[in-house]
């Protein structure tokens, strides 16, 4: 969450305190439904809001938690539909190696939350 | 149209697969361009070799696949009773034993397989037979006429068929199997043991782990079998049924490629190494593997017809699933029956008394059925095998698939063959076996409703063998729900953060967070969306409505006891109409309104709350409804006012958070029209008062509630119910309904009676006080949310575009109401895409 990068193409979506700790909001960014979720350390993560399994646009309403792995604790959101977990940092589904959802750059400037372009992976 | 040159197709072999090939050739029009000559060695047309054993009962006629003796297509010629001596790929000719030479454009080999006779000394003595053709059976029948004892070498599928035949012929019958169990290829040890008990029950003698070393001789005839390290068996008739070998001699002689382990090597179109020669059925070896079942043979026949018509068909392996009735015993084996898949789990149900054994093999994540074995009862095969083939998700309670129907709970008396997972037909014994073998089953992986039952079975098993069972809630807490409840109560924690910091690790998950939210609701009270509690809730609790497949919600206002005024009915209708909601009557005597967008929920609640409605808690692991019959007010049979009591109980316990959903019912007489015994608590009126039943449920494993106490006055009834419900809330596992909870207590229902009625723990007053706090602390969650701008903030479609409806949600009309346009098939974790 630096303030150095060029954010002219970013979309201002809300204030930081609009997003609860371990909660989330959905927002529209260039027509895409994006979920912004906030982990316990205060960090924000933006991922596609669509649950790839049910195709419903619901991930912002999932439970945020952590799963311990060999590489350390992975912050994740569990889909409210069928509970599949997604790594908030990468969009990788933790229950199905073949499934990954898009992630977006997200920044906080002066308590404003800005969502950037879809990350290329 | 130019005149077409007609081509000739020669088929060698008229068994089941050769016949199927000709049928397909006729049906698909191959005979429009080809003349077909079929050459069969046996004296009769193709017959049902799979049903060979019934020959003695029904005769050859009934087994015939071509009773007319010829095909109903003049372009097909059938030559029977004639062996083929050879063929020459160079000249494209077939030489018949009678000297005829047939030219061919395409040649199909369907020569099948021959029984394997182990080359033990004496195997050619008179009295030795194989079991393959009607002629074999006729010869066996003749020999049996003057004999008293028969022995079959081979305890596989065919061996047991042969043993059945000998037994039918009145012989004292022995089965000699080299492997440690019967049907070693298809079924596992436990299944084999169950099958063995059946077979022995029919009077047959089974010798497993027995190697035949010789055929004993007396007067130039068979006198018995010599066994390795065992006493010989006297027998006048010996049938070898120790496997089959592909009949590939013609192809070998013609110089075609042969698979390493025998069989004519063919490609995916079943074409041999010569482009005009094809092989199908047991003589063929697609990718080097021979298939000793008829179904793959049929598939190969279809593939060759397709290939000859220029189609894309390919044979890429076959489902080797088998289901048959052997000696009157159902036996089925399907998919990965031996759990060879990495991480596969087994769910087992076995009932030694009833002679039923069922095993399911499920994927490591429990979501998919990989295979299974059914012995004694294969009724689930029809459901299970397709689940393997299609990879569809298992229900959450797959044990239901193999438990005997109607079993709801597990207790020590639960038979091993009881189906625990019906989605996957997993029985108790399968689960126990999997636990014992450290493998997995598919139980609980589909609909999930059996998960707590599976968990209990596995725990019971490990406890029974003296192992410590880890009942941890999840990776974040090394505690059971009950221990967590006590910890929260003792320390007075008021937030998830306090609990996880003191007793857990990490930041929780979708398992522990809702569980702790429920515990906090029971101990602390307050609104479920208050402060940091909100982020612990599952989406249903978080939005006070039930999420549906397209991300919209359904709304259920409380209608206590199912009693509602016309004015309120009209309001519900108006709200549904104005918001375009789909309406449906629920099983709990209320009305569900579907299709509400998240941003519409507050406005819908506003209308309902203003009309005197409140939340029905359909979204919560909480009290849902108390169903009632119309009772003594109207009913000429009613003896008590069941509606009044139902309303009183529903209002008393509304909003009560619990380990799972809670349902109640009150019937006004013994006719039980409210189906109260299908509820967690059921009250049935008597002349003197009320009978209280507890521990019932409907759903996947229906259980009838059992009598806790009888002829109670209303005050005592409510006191017992307060204690019962609070005791359950404090001590049950996560997502454990009352029925399995009662069974999980040492002493079961008697224990519940001691605590609730006799107050043996001295907890009565405490439990009643806890309920009293709940009753006074109750608030309508919808009204409270409407009054709190902070809680309402989250009810928007998009935080930066609160007025823009989610464009992914669309509806279509069905039977006059709006229903969701399906967004994509809901695919559970691990299912193939």
Image (cartoon, coloured by chain):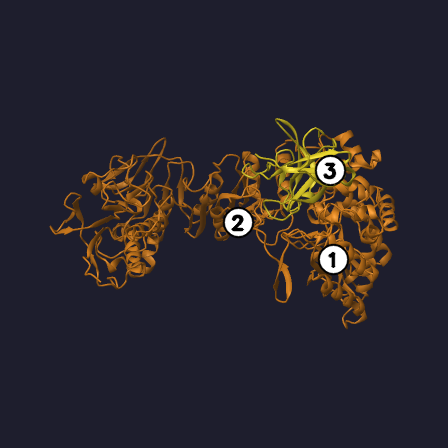
Chain colours: A yellow, B orange
Q: CA distance from mark 1 to mark 3?
A: 36 Å
Position of B796 compared to B171: left or right?
Answer: right
Q: Does B621 appear above or below B287?
A: below
Residue B467 quadrant: top right
Percent x, y for residue B279?
Answer: 27, 46
| Element type at mark 3 | strand
Q: Earlier in the sequence, mark 2 or mark 1?
A: 2
- Mark toward the viewer: 3 or 2: 3
Label 2 to label 1: alpha-carbon separation: 45 Å
Q: Do the residues marked 2 and 1 share a common chain?
A: yes
Q: Which residue is mark 2?
A: B354
- The image's mark for residue B591 is none
> Which residue is at the front of the view, B309 or B489?
B309
The residue identified by callout 3 is: A113
- List x then y, in percent, for residue B511: 69, 39
**What residue is drawn where x is 44% and y is 45%?**
B200
Q: Position of residue B742 (x, y in %)?
A: 72, 46
Mark 2 belongs to chain: B
Q: Can you identify the residue that label 1 sits on?
A: B556
| Camera-side mark, 1 or 3 | 3
Which quadrant: the N terminus of chain B?
A: bottom left
Q: Is the residue B211 above or below the residue B725 in the image?
A: above
The image shows residue B17, relative to residue A106, as above or below, that is below
Q: CA distance from mark 3 to mark 2?
A: 66 Å
């Amino acid at each position: 969450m630096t303030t150095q990068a060029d954010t002219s193409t970013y979309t201002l979506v809300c204030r930081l305190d609009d997003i609860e700790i371990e909660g989330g909001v959905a927002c529209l960014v260039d027509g895409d439904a994006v979920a912004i979720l906030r982990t316990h350390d205060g960090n924000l993560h933006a991922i596609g809001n669509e649950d790839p399994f049910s195709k419903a646009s619901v991930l912002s309403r999932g439970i945020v938690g952590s799963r311990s792995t060999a590489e350390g604790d992975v912050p994740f959101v569990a889909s409210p539909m069928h509970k599949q977990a997604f790594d908030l940092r990468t969009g990788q589904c933790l229950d199905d190696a073949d499934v990954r959802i898009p992630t977006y750059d997200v920044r906080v400037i002066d308590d404003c939350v800005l969502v950037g372009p879809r990350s290329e992976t | 149209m130019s005149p077409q040159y007609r081509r000739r197709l020669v088929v060698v072999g008229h068994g089941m697969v050769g016949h199927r090939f000709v049928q397909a050739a006729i049906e698909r029009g191959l005979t429009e361009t080809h003349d077909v000559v079929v050459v069969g060695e046996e004296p009769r047309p193709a017959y049902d070799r799979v049903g060979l054993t019934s020959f003695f009962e029904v005769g050859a006629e009934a087994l015939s696949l071509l009773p007319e003796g010829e095909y109903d297509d003049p372009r097909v010629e059938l030559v029977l009773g004639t062996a083929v001596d050879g063929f020459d790929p160079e000249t494209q000719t077939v030489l018949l034993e009678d000297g005829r030479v047939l030219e061919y454009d395409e040649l199909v080999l369907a020569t099948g397989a021959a029984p394997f006779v182990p080359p033990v000394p004496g195997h050619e003595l008179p009295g030795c037979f194989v079991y393959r053709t009607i002629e074999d059976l006729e010869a066996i029948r003749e020999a049996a006429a003057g004999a008293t004892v028969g022995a079959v070498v081979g305890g596989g599928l065919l061996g047991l068929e042969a043993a059945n035949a000998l037994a039918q012929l009145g012989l004292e019958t022995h089965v000699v199997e080299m492997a440690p169990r019967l049907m070693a290829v298809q079924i596992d040890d436990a299944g084999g043991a169950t099958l063995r008990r059946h077979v022995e029950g029919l009077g047959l003698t089974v010798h497993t782990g027995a190697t035949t070393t010789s055929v004993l001789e007396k007067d130039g005839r068979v006198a018995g079998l010599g066994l390795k390290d065992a006493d010989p068996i006297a027998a006048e008739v010996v049938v070898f049924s120790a496997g089959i070998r592909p009949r590939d001699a013609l192809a070998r002689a013609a110089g075609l490629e042969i698979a390493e382990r025998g069989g004519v090597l063919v490609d995916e179109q079943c074409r041999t190494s010569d482009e005009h020669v094809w092989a199908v059925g047991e003589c063929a070896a697609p990718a080097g593997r021979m298939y000793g079942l008829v179904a793959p043979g049929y598939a190969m026949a279809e593939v060759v017809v397709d290939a000859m018509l220029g189609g894309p068909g390919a044979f890429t392996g076959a489902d080797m699933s088998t289901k048959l009735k052997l000696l009157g015993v159902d036996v089925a084996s399907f998919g990965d029956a031996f759990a060879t898949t990495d991480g596969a789990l087994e769910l087992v149900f076995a009932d030694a008394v009833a002679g039923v054994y069922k095993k399911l093999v499920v994927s490591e994540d429990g979501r998919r059925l990989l295979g299974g074995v059914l012995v004694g009862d294969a009724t689930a095969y029809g459901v299970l095998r397709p689940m393997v083939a299609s990879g569809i998700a298992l229900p959450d309670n797959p044990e239901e698939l193999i438990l005997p129907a109607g079993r709801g709970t597990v207790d020590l008396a639960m038979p091993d063959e009881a189906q625990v997972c019906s989605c996957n037909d997993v029985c108790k014994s399968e689960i126990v076996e999997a636990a014992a073998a450290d493998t997995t089953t598919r139980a609980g992986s589909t609909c999930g409703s059996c998960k707590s039952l599976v968990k209990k079975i596995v725990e019971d098993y490990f406890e029974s063998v003296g192992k410590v069972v880890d009942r941890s809630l999840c990776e974040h807490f090394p505690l059971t729900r009950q221990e967590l409840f006590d910890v929260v109560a003792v320390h007075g924690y008021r937030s998830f953060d306090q609990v996880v910091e003191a007793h857990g690790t990490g930041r929780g998950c979708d398992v522990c967070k809702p569980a702790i939210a429920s515990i906090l609701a029971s101990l602390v009270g307050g609104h479920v969306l208050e402060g940091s509690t909100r982020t612990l809730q599952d989406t249903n609790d978080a939005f006070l409505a039930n999420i549906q497949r397209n991300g919209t919600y359904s709304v259920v206002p409380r209608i206590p006891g199912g009693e509602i005024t016309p004015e309120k009915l009209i309001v519900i209708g108006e709200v549904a109409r104005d918001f375009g909601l789909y309406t449906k009557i629920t099983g709990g005597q209320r009305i569900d309104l579907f299709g509400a967008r998240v941003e519409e929920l507050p406005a819908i609640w506003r209308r309902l709350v203003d009309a005197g409605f409140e939340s029905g808690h359909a979204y919560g692991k909480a009290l849902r409804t108390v169903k009632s019959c119309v009772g003594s007010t109207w009913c000429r049979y009613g003896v008590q006012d069941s509606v009044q009591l139902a309303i009183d109980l529903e209002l008393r316990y509304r909003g009560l958070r619990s380990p799972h959903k809670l349902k109640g019912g009150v019937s006004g007489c013994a006719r039980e029209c409210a189906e109260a015994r299908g509820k967690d608590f059921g009250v049935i009126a008597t002349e003197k008062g009320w009978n209280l039943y507890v521990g019932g449920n409907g759903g996947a494993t229906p259980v009838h509630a059992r009598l806790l106490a009888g002829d109670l006055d209303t005050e005592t009834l409510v006191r017992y119910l307060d204690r019962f419900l609070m005791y359950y809330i404090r001590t049950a596992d996560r997502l454990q309904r009352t029925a399995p909870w009662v069974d999980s207590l040492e002493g079961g229902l008697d224990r519940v009676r001691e605590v609730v009625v006799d107050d043996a723990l001295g907890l009565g007053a405490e439990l009643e006080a806890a309920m009293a706090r709940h009753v006074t602390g109750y608030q309508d969650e919808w009204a409270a949310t409407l009054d709190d701008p902070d809680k309402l903030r989250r009810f928007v479609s998009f935080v930066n575009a609160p007025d823009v409806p989610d464009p992914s949600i669309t509806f279509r009309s069905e039977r006059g109401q709006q229903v969701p346009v399906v967004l994509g098939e809901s695919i559970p974790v691990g299912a193939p895409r």
